[in-house]
Amino acid sequence: MTDMQGRDEPVHEISPEECRKLLSAFEFGRIAFRVGDVLEVFPINYHASGNEITFRTAPGTKLAGVLLADDVVFEIDNIGVKEAWSVIGHGKARRLESSDEVEAASRLPIHPLVPTVKREYVRIDLSRVSGRRFHRWPEPDADNEPLVDSSD
């Protein structure tokens, strides 16, 4: 479908396959989870492969909360001149405990922003991913365009 200027729609769904490719192409995102009545959001450096997001952390609020949460949301986005996109994954987090898993995770290219000791590895097993791509066109004249809800 095109708009009044003959352009494609401004919002497009991203396929799950492309979402996974985008996740694996980047290394910085955010996790969000709820523990009780508290909603937490943390930036993380990560490594993505298939339906797995792996990150390092230290003991504390992030580690305890992400392991207690029923659902963890992971999000990355990119804003360019002509388009922007956002990818969101949902899943359950678990601490890597076996020596084989920890050893394999220690070889992943996870580069923390803050140079602190982070010896705990956590993996989010994604149960679903979704994404949207947005064209960054000039805003239409409000008098000539119908209202569009892009939150669907």
Image (cartoon, rainbow, N blue to C red):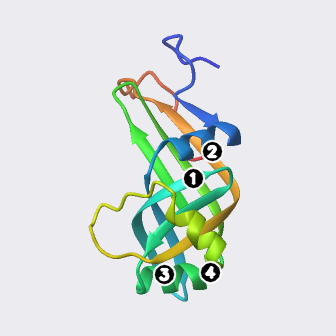
- Please state which of residues 147 and 43 is positioned toward the viewer in this rendering: 43
Q: Secondary structure at mark 4?
A: loop
- Please state which of residues 68 and 133 is positioned toward the viewer in this rendering: 68
* Residue positioned 59% across, 17% down in the render: 2
**Residue 26's spot in the image, x, y percent?**
46, 45
Comparing labels 3 and 4, the label whose residue is closer to the camera = 4
Q: Which residue is mark 3?
A: 63
Q: Earlier in the sequence, mark 4 or mark 1?
A: 1
Label 2 environment density (alpha carbons within 10 Å; few <14, some 14–19, many ≥20) = many
Q: Which residue is mark 1?
A: 48
Distance of mark 4 from mark 2, alpha carbons? 25 Å
Name the residue type under label 4. Answer: Glu
Label 4 environment density (alpha carbons within 10 Å; few <14, some 14–19, many ≥20) = few
* Residue positioned 45% across, 46% down in the render: 77
Name the residue type under label 1. Answer: Ala
Q: Which residue is mark 4?
A: 97
Vertical relation: 144 (above or below) 20: above
Name, please, the residue furthest toward the left.
115
Vertical relation: 78 (above or below) 98: above
Label 1 environment density (alpha carbons within 10 Å; few <14, some 14–19, many ≥20) = many
Do the CB atoms of the residues marked 3 and 1 lie less than 8 Å apart? no
- Please state which of residues 124 and 117 is positioned toward the viewer in this rendering: 117
| Residue 19 in the figure: left or right of residue 142 | right
Label of residue 100 in the image: none
Q: Earlier in the sequence, mark 2 or mark 1?
A: 2
Name, please, the residue furthest toward the right.
127
Name the residue type under label 3. Answer: Leu
* Residue positioned 40% across, 69% down in the render: 42
Q: Which residue is mark 2?
A: 20
Do the CB atoms of the residues marked 3 and 4 lie less than 8 Å apart? no
Do the CB atoms of the residues marked 2 and 1 lie less than 8 Å apart? yes
Q: Earlier in the sequence, mark 3 or mark 4?
A: 3
